[in-house]
Amino acid sequence: MIDQSRQVTPVLGFAGFSGSGKTTLLEAVIPHLNSSGLRVGLLKHSHHDIEPDKPTKDSYRLRYAGSDQLLLATSRRHMLFFEYRGNEERDPQLRECLAQLDHSRLDIVLVEGFRNETLPKIEIHRPSYGKPTLFPHDTHIIAIAYDQKPDALDEFNLPSLDLNQPSDIAGFIKYWLANAPESEKYLAYELKL
């Protein structure tokens, strides 16, 4: 059940194996959504350790001085850092990450990665990459974007999207936003938020 006391935003994932082109596709789709007036949030899961700061910057120095959370605020953007020290290192949790976003400023949250999580997803698939499709084993995949039609697709009733047509994929997302049942759009919040 969705907690109506908290404002939430529809969530749509982009799932595929590493190297399938999820980031490149999102980079091309987001401007089309923005030009339609949609405010897009993005949550990207990474398996790599990242350091978005430089050792000479005050924010870096303060984080490494021992702050567990640091919000760097400027007139153009805010950046929120969470530090997990020692034994606290852990894989991020989708619902926890979603709760950190300011939903009052968003119309949709696109999620890259978290492919095993329960949320509606568009699968990104390139048969030439040699990886299997996800949709036969994931009932939360609502469409598949590909550059060459996968063999198993004929057995499933899924919308097909051309990976090289980001405006069409943006159109599908806008259609989904307007027509999907609320239980699907808010599936990522289903258990708790």
Image: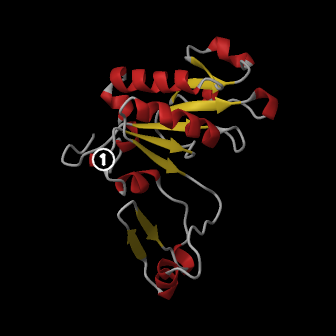
Give the labeled residue for mark 1. 105
Q: Nearer the viewer, residue 100 or 183?
A: 100
6 is higher (above) or lower (below) than 133:
below
Across and down, in percent, residue 169 comes to 53, 25
Q: Residue at x 36, y 54 (%)?
A: 101
**Quadrant of the rendered image containing residue 160:** top right
Across and down, in percent, residue 49 comes to 63, 66
User: What quarter of the picture does the N terminus occupy?
Assistant: top left
Across and down, in percent, residue 149 comes to 71, 18
Under circle 1, the secondary element is helix
Can you name the residue that lies furthest to the left here? 5
Q: Nearer the viewer, residue 68 or 186?
A: 68
Q: Is residue 119 left or right of residue 47?
A: left
Across and down, in percent, residue 4 comes to 20, 43
**Quadrant of the rendered image containing residue 36:** top left
- Please count the marks in the image: 1
Q: Is residue 133 left or right of residue 193?
A: right
31 is higher (above) or lower (below) than 53:
above
Q: What sort of colour scheme is used for the picture?
A: secondary structure
Can you name the residue that lies furthest to the front here? 75
Q: Residue at x 37, y 40 (%)?
A: 39
Q: Nearer the viewer, residue 164 or 148?
A: 164
Badge 1 crowding class, 10 Å Cα cut-off, few under 14, some 14 to 19, many 20 or more, is few
Q: Amino acid at mark 1?
A: Arg
47 is higher (above) or lower (below) than 181:
below
58 is higher (above) or lower (below) than 179:
below
Q: Residue at x 40, y 60 (%)?
A: 77
Q: Residue at x 37, y 57 (%)?
A: 100
